[in-house]
Image (spheres, grey):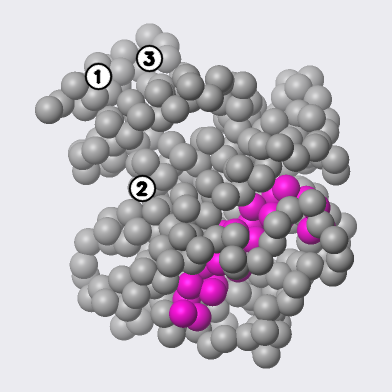
Amino acid sequence: MSGHPAELTGLDLHEVWTGAPPLGDRFDPFSFPQRMAAYRALIQATNHNGLFGADNRDNPLWGLMFQHQWQHRTGRLGLGDRIDPDAGWGFGNYALCVIPWLGAVAAGVVPPAELLEPPGPTRFRYGPEQFDTGLADWRRYFELVRATRPGSDLEPLRLALWKAHKSCLDVVAGQIATTEPDPYSPTELLFLRGWCRMVDYLWAAAWRTDFDFMVEYGLDVLPEHPLRAESDLAALPTRARRNVRNVLRLARTPDWRYALNLLLWRRVMRTRQARDEVLAMLEAVFQPSTGTKAARRRLIGYLLRP
């Protein structure tokens, strides 16, 4: 297949990109290859007139595909290529794969298909009716993509994408908050809950999720196996260990404190200048040290700016 960055051939995502059969008349959302085929269809269908570059590398949907590949590779979705309907990571991805796909269908970007239901009773509430706001936001995102001309500033698209992402993930976080750990360990479930909160920080910053940014900053930062206990963190590579500790700390933050911190972070991220500095600003927030003094001063300046 064409229309993808040449560097993809060196990543494990390439096998799925080239090997997942296209969606036909039926979409089984509990099949890993089918979800990846849906992502591929969305990425290919949205690069009209080279909006995201000749090889589509600037498409912000790459981040969702990379994240799903990580979930599958690390065994967080279930056995083999079947996605366990009771797996929290799988439910979260349903909201960020199936609902965007339905939004694209509604916007006329991809053709419709019959959406299959879970194979049996589940502890999560599946179905598009759970995500009315998210579905509407994703439809608006894809309509905005169609209306955007090549050469335009892409940040408005990122802002719209993250708005839709947030609408869906809020539903997921609400259901996960009351679920039992199985089939995960308590530590892994805590990590999943904290990751939902960390993504709120990325949402406020309109975090880039294009191919190049994901390859440079989005790989090798998450654990390559489900966490059994916090003692597992000692064996993780430095970047992943530091990131997981931050995520677990977020998960343990009281709701009121988390809401206040997120409010302050959103204020910091009001301007394009601050969003362009998101890497340094996140470091200042989550890794305060003598090395981040200058960044912390700038962060305070963004916070206090009228």
| Mark positioned earlier in the residue sequence (1 or 3) | 3
Disc 1/disc 2 C-alpha distance (Å): 19 Å
Residue 40 seen in the figure: no
Q: Which mark is residue 206?
A: 2
Q: Residues within 10 Å of mark 2 (few under 14, many from 20)?
A: many
Q: Which kind of residue does numbered mark 1 sit on?
A: Ile
Pointer 3: what residue? 291
**Predominant SS of the magenta segment:** helix
Residue 11 to residue 18: above or below: above
On whether residue 98 falls in the magenta region, the answer is yes
Disc 3/disc 2 C-alpha distance (Å): 25 Å
Residue plotted at (68% across, 78% down)? 115
Q: Which kind of residue does numbered mark 2 sit on?
A: Ala
Pointer 1: what residue? 300
Q: Closer to the camera: disc 3 or disc 2?
A: 2
Q: Closer to the camera: disc 1 or disc 3?
A: 1
Q: Which kind of residue does numbered mark 3 sit on?
A: Gly
Percent x, y for residue 36? 65, 69
Residue 304 to residue 10: above or below: above
Residue in front for this viewpoint, 26 or 8 = 26
Residues shaded magenta: 84-106
Disc 1/disc 3 C-alpha distance (Å): 16 Å
Q: Residue furthest left?
A: 306
Percent x, y for residue 10? 61, 61
